[in-house]
């Protein structure tokens, strides 16, 4: 059995995996997805359990990244499973999955830019940080992130609804973005939007980093930590860029090896979409001492903020006794 797949300007007939191979690939995808989601879910549980975290703008923004990763991972695993099990989907279902996944994907670099700005304000305007970076303002910033992401993808949906025939919405397609947003101008718009988004995010990170660098002439520990944090945001943004290369890498490999389409789709999804969702939360979340301490207490079930506060209060007393 084969499927007709249009990939960019390439249209080719490709075989589907045999049942044993399809089962193995689905098991790998689902196990990875569940494992990463469990780790991310632990971070969210820790965040909700400790007021010292859920009232801090920095951790609120970080958890927003984690939530988007969970949404994206769930949709990727679901989509791969449906594509293997059914082969094709109704365009309406496919478009819903693609739109939500795109929103979650676009949210991450924008959130990283906001996190870098929060570090910049904390170091360069410490007296105004409390007034500027409030919990309410943080949620407003998250709302703006969703608005910007929506303005990037929702116009494409309206174009599809206006230009595609009714027969298209009653047909079945192999669920990839190019099968839904088939207009060549929409593909160009997508690429331009991604490039503009990434450039603006990089410029924000560079601006925040160098301003923090200049403010850190006194070599204070807070400034040094903030500078390293912005560098870490740059690493996280690099992981986001892997996701944006997924489409072009897949198309290029399919053009070279059309007979290996199922394997290319599986490997690029795992390497460029799934695994980066594991690295980013672990590197950032477990690197932070306060968050790491809260995670340990949540896993041990040894109490929340009160236990941490008592532990912090005991340290100076022990140090004085020594």
Image (cartoon, grey):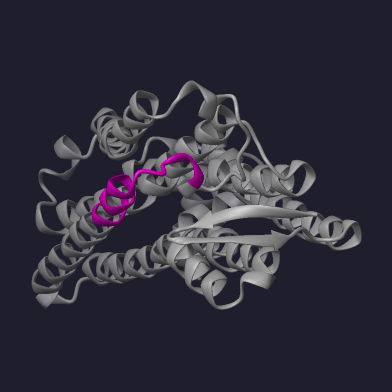
Residue ID at (25%, 69%) = 227
Q: Is residue 133 visible?
A: yes
Q: Nearer the viewer, residue 145 or 313?
A: 145
Residue ID at (51%, 41%) = 67
- Residue 237 in magenta stretch: no
Above/below status of 163 relative to 58: above
Above/below status of 143 relative to 82: above
Q: Nearer the viewer, residue 1 or 222?
A: 1
In the visual, does 194 lie left or right of 55?
left
Magenta span covers which residues? 179-192
In the visual, does 220 lie left or right of 300?
left
- Residue 185 in magenta stretch: yes
Q: How many marks?
A: 0
Q: Main secondary structure of the magenta part?
A: helix
Image coordinates for residue 220, horizontal then vertical, percent: 20, 71
Image coordinates for residue 278, horizontal then vertical, percent: 58, 61
Q: Is residue 296 visible?
A: no
Location of the N terminus (image quadrant): bottom right
Among the 4 quarters of the image, the one containing residue 192: bottom left
Q: Nearer the viewer, residue 312 or 289?
A: 289
Residue ID at (56%, 49%) = 294
Residue positioned most to the top: 166
Residue ID at (35%, 29%) = 163
Image coordinates for residue 65, horizontal then vertical, percent: 44, 47
In the visual, does 144 lie left or right of 127?
right
Image coordinates for residue 205, horizontal then vertical, percent: 21, 63
């Amino acid at each position: 059995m084969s499927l007709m797949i249009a990939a960019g300007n390439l249209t080719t007939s490709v075989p589907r995996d045999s049942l044993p191979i399809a089962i193995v690939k689905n098991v790998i995808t689902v196990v990875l997805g569940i494992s990463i989601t469990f780790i991310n879910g632990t971070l969210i549980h820790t965040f909700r359990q400790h007021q010292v975290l859920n009232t801090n703008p920095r951790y609120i923004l970080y958890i927003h990244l984690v939530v988007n990763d969970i949404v994206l991972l769930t949709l990727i695993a679901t989509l791969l499973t449906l594509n293997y099990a059914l082969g094709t989907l109704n365009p309406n279902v496919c478009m819903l999955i693609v739109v939500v996944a795109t929103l979650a994907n676009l949210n991450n670099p924008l959130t990283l830019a906001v996190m870098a700005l929060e570090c910049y304000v904390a170091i360069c305007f410490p007296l105004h940080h409390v007034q500027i970076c409030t919990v309410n303002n943080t949620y407003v910033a998250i709302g703006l992130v969703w608005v910007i992401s929506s303005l990037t993808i929702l116009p494409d949906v309206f174009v599809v609804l206006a230009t595609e025939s009714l027969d298209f919405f009653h047909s079945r397609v192999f669920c990839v973005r190019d099968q839904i947003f088939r207009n060549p101008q929409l593909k160009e718009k997508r690429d331009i939007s991604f490039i503009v988004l990434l450039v603006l995010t990089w410029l924000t990170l560079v601006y925040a980093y160098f301003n923090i660098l200049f403010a850190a002439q006194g070599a204070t520990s807070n400034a040094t930590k903030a500078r390293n944090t912005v560098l870490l945001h740059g690493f996280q943004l690099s992981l986001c860029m892997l996701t944006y290369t997924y489409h072009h890498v897949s198309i290029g490999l399919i053009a070279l090896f059309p007979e290996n389409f199922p394997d290319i789709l599986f490997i690029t999804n795992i390497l460029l979409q799934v695994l980066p969702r594991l690295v980013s939360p672990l590197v950032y979340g477990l690197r932070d001492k306060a968050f790491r301490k809260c995670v340990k207490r949540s896993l041990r079930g040894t109490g929340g903020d009160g236990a941490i506060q008592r532990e912090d209060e005991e340290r100076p007393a022990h140090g004085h006794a020594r």
